[in-house]
Image (cartoon, rainbow, N blue to C red):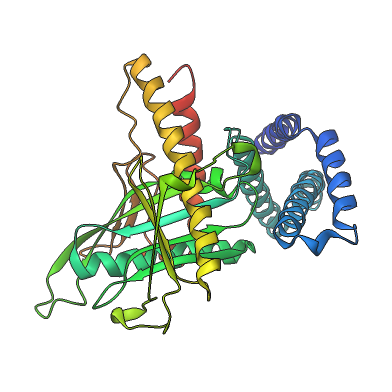
Amino acid sequence: MAVVDVSEALKSLTSTMESIEAVLDLEKLRADIAVLEEQAAAPSLWDDPDNAQRVTSKLSYLQGQLRRVEELHGRIEDVGVLFELADAEDDADARAEAEGELAAVQKAVDELEVRTLLSGEYDAREAMVSIRAEAGGVDAADFAEQLQRMYLRWAERRGYPTEVLDTSYAEEAGIKSTTFSVKAPYAYGTLSVEQGTHRMVRISPFDNQGRRQTSFAGVEVMPVVEQTDHIDIPENELRVDVFRSSGPGGQSVNTTDSAVRMTHLPTGIVVSCQNEKSQIQNRAAALRVMQSRLLAHRRAEEQAKMDALKSDGGNSWGNQMRSYVLQPYQMVKDLRTEHEVGNPQGVLDGDIDGFLEAGIRWRKRQESPAS
């Protein structure tokens, strides 16, 4: 790498950081942190555990954002010094080390820049994720379970708390559907690009003839409802049924009718929850999921009206969006962004940041007036 390239690279990084700081508004960020620190120090904080978790989670996230910005400033300055020392001593090993650090800093700045693209109305919210097995029989049910594990592992790697609210197990293997929440700021904005139909191609472990099988699973991502959303549901619009919780293979895992199925009569939206121990807890959890679904339903209706006005109905999130190919070759490819990797097992183990970043950038381009 020529010296002039290093100079231009550092200048570009500094310029990008200035843009990031302008979007993040560091003065406001520090003020928000101060307010949250005061709330977190209040003796009565844990009187309301849900609010306490929101406060501490948001505080941790904002502190992390500020720390990342400050650390990246230092790393950009340090990498310039590393190149100067390598050139002064004509040390090839030191220069290789400096080039490696420059690449690492560039990657970190790119990741931070993606956060500034999450500016949608609900992007800062926590996320509610639902996965359902679609075409493909038992392979689809197994694939749906792999996707659930993928997202939960991704959240675990980032230290994001999760809560599985409902899992409907398939008879032979895998799951029919699941709903879980990711309790971290901007989880919705980040994961919303995962919405759509996912496709897996592999030699089926459930086919005794070893044939290749294609299966599908649908992913839905919703913002968690907050008090300001005004999602009020009259009691006469809900039908609530109770049933016995079941586990893998349909076996009963509870001797009482504690699981809850909730139907919103005007829209026909159905949710269920069976992971809590009591019917009251499951009803409360089901109501939270229902509110998120109704919020997403309302947003979809508003978007449909806007698309009709623009005569643009081509950006459906329900279409196939990613393929996971295990046979006859190894590849995971996003069909919208063209981002692909050759390590499906790594992706299914939660390494999806590259797909998330590409999806967020792609969505921003789609929203641009020039697109």
Q: Is residue 159 left or right of residue 172?
A: right
Residue 85, percent from left and from top:
81, 50
Q: Which x, y percent locates residue 225? A: 57, 45
Q: Residue at x 90, y 62 (%)?
A: 43
Residue at the limit of the structure toward the left, as seen here: 209
Vertical side of 204 occupied by 15: above or below: above
63 and 76: which is toward the camera = 63
> Which residue is found at the position 50% from the left and 47% from the top?
292
* Left or right position of 119 against 133: right
User: Residue visible at 37% across and 58% down?
Assistant: 131
- Between 337 and 23, which is closer to the camera in this rendering? 23
Task: Check the image and report above or below for 287 versus 312.
Answer: below
- State the image quarter where residue 239 is shown: bottom left
Residue 255 visible in the snapshot: yes
Residue 167 lies in quadrant: bottom left
Position of the N terminus by quadrant: top right
